[in-house]
Amino acid sequence: MLDPVCGVQVSEDDAAICLSFLDRRYCFCSLQCEEEFVEHPERYVLRDQDQWSGIEGVA
């Protein structure tokens, strides 16, 4: 799978960290990429107004 922040190919076994967000699994090559994703998930996940409504901190 691809790290959604930087686009690097990463496997779950080799990832620095993985997390689930809106019923989908994401893995990251570094903690910096994971932190960026957590701070601004709307930049990296297709935005659907109904999907994002009610999530605190997301415009």
Image (cartoon, grey):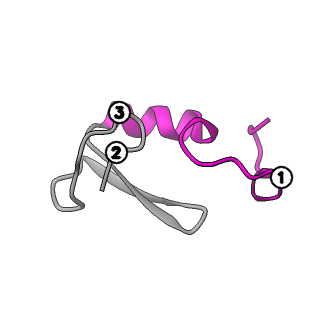
Separation (CA) of disc 3 from disc 1: 26 Å
Do labels 2 and 1 touch, CB within 8 Å?
A: no
For residue 3, which numbered disc appears in the image?
2
User: Dot 1 corresponds to which residue?
Assistant: 53
Amino acid bearing label 2:
Asp
Q: Which residues are magenta?
A: 31-59
User: Dot 3 corresponds to which residue?
Assistant: 6
Please check the rendered image and state whether residue 56 is part of the magenta-colored stretch, yes or no. yes
Asked if 39 appears above or below 2 in the picture, the reply is above
Q: Residue furthest bottom?
A: 23
Residue 1 at x, y percent in the picture: 30, 56
Secondary structure of the residue carrying numbered label 2: loop
Residue 45 at x, y percent in the picture: 57, 47
Separation (CA) of disc 2 from disc 1: 25 Å
Assign the C terminus to one quadrant of the image.
top right
Q: Examine the image and state in which quarter residue 33 appears.
A: top left
* 12 horizontally vs 42: left or right: left
Amino acid bearing label 3:
Cys
Mark 3 or 1: in front is 3
Task: Looking at the image, tell me whether mark 2 or mark 1 is earlier in sequence order.
Answer: 2
Please check the rendered image and state whether residue 38 is part of the magenta-colored stretch, yes or no. yes
Amino acid bearing label 1:
Ser
How many residues crowd around disc 1 within 10 Å: few (fewer than 14), some, or many (20 or more)? few
Do labels 2 and 3 touch, CB within 8 Å?
A: yes
How many residues crowd around disc 2 within 10 Å: few (fewer than 14), some, or many (20 or more)? many
For residue 29, which numbered disc appears in the image?
none
Task: Looking at the image, tell me whether mark 3 or mark 1 is earlier in sequence order.
Answer: 3
